[in-house]
Amino acid sequence: MNSLGFSTAPEDTRIVVAMSGGVDSSVTAALLKDQGYDVVGITLQLYDHGVAVQKKGACCAGQDIHDARRVAEAIGIPHYVLDYENRFQDSVMEEFADSYLRGETPVPCVRCNQTVKFRDLLETSKDLGAVAMATGHYIRREGGETGARLYRGANSIKDQSYFLFATTQDQADFLRFPLGGLTKDETRALADKYNLAVAAKPESQDICFVPNGNYASVIERIRPGAGREGDIVDLAGNVMGRHNGIINYTIGQRRGLGIATGSPLYVVRLDPTGNKVVVGPPEALQISKVTLREMNWIGDTALSVEGSKVSVKVRSTQEPLQATVYGAANNWAEVHLDNPEGGVSPGQACVMYDGDRLLGGGWIAGTEAPVIV
């Protein structure tokens, strides 16, 4: 059995490595090549870096494609660049813009993994005769009798399991994550060991197609007229001020509202139908129930209406919260939090765990406040 779990010798085991041009995927390719595998590097061109202005640290555009090619040449593996711009535009960028127009706060990196990378690129890997596709994500994978299991990365600071909640069982069986047990410092040390030109390259930014963090400008370009002005209202519907487009606001936001009151107000809801930003006191942000769509579940037993105790993350950076998840028809689910949580926004992901094990998750479609008895 080789290090990736196959019975063949490494030189007879073809692995496609998704190379973004960053340190993590470059080390993944070098590490597998060093272990003797038949490695093929593939880089995706996902957007036109002349239209979506490239910024330092963006992935899958000009400089990063060049960096991936240089690494592939240095370690001696074949490298291909695939033009996935149209797929990325349809599956990620347009969905990103439409999500903001629905009053949501999307996570485009998850959608990219869910569609372009772990669906389209994975199928291309199979077409190339690969038995697995490897990436530089910090998540651990272990084989199991009923299929592969996914776990949080060994280094909690770099753990990327939240962004991979939509990984299906079939995809998990095909994928490999060689860096899951490493820290970032250990990865950079390997980059130095292999003399990779990207060893000191800065971290890539989460959203590659958003220049300078200006979400609104990208949304306006994709959906002209998206920044339509409207009213800022309180919970009773009283007009408190004006906004410059709901795409500029997120749940839990306090700064930049332009409202002078004696106590702090936060964005508690976005009303795309009425084109209103609803504000209220901090306690109005508390929710106890979350409704999920596109639920993906990779636990050992099926998700049922009776409910399962889980821990959940409704933001990538938070510690898991205790909750119960109830399955529903058509890949919907409902999560009841043991304790109310603030600042939960539709469009974000609710990701589920059993200890360190990733069980899946879904997209937040709606929230409910605690019932006051």
Image (tube, grey):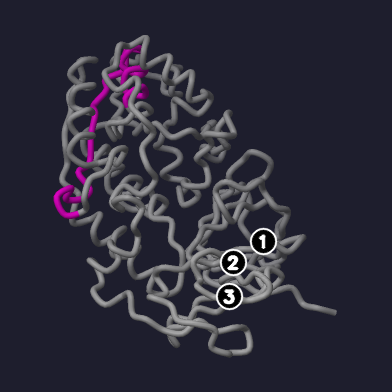
Q: Indicate which disc, 3 or 2, sits on the residue closer to the N terminus.
A: 3
Q: Quadrant of the C terminus?
A: bottom right
Q: Which residues are magenta?
A: 26-51
The question of residue 257 being in magenta is answered with no
Q: CA distance from mark 1 to mark 3?
A: 40 Å
Residue 59: give x, y in percent of width and height.
29, 40
Q: Do the residues under discs 2 and 1 have CB atoms within 8 angstroms?
A: yes
Q: CA distance from mark 3 to mark 2?
A: 40 Å
Q: CA distance from mark 2 to mark 1?
A: 7 Å
The amino acid type found where label 2 is placed reads: Ala
Residue at which label 1 appears: 325
Front position in the image: 269 or 74: 269
> For numbered disc 3, what is the local secondary structure?
loop
In terms of image quadrants, where is residue 149? top right
Using a 10 Å C-alpha cutoff, classify the residue at mark 2 as few (fewer than 14 neighbours), some (14 to 19) or many (20 or more): many
Residue at which label 2 appears: 333
> For numbered disc 2, what is the local secondary structure?
strand
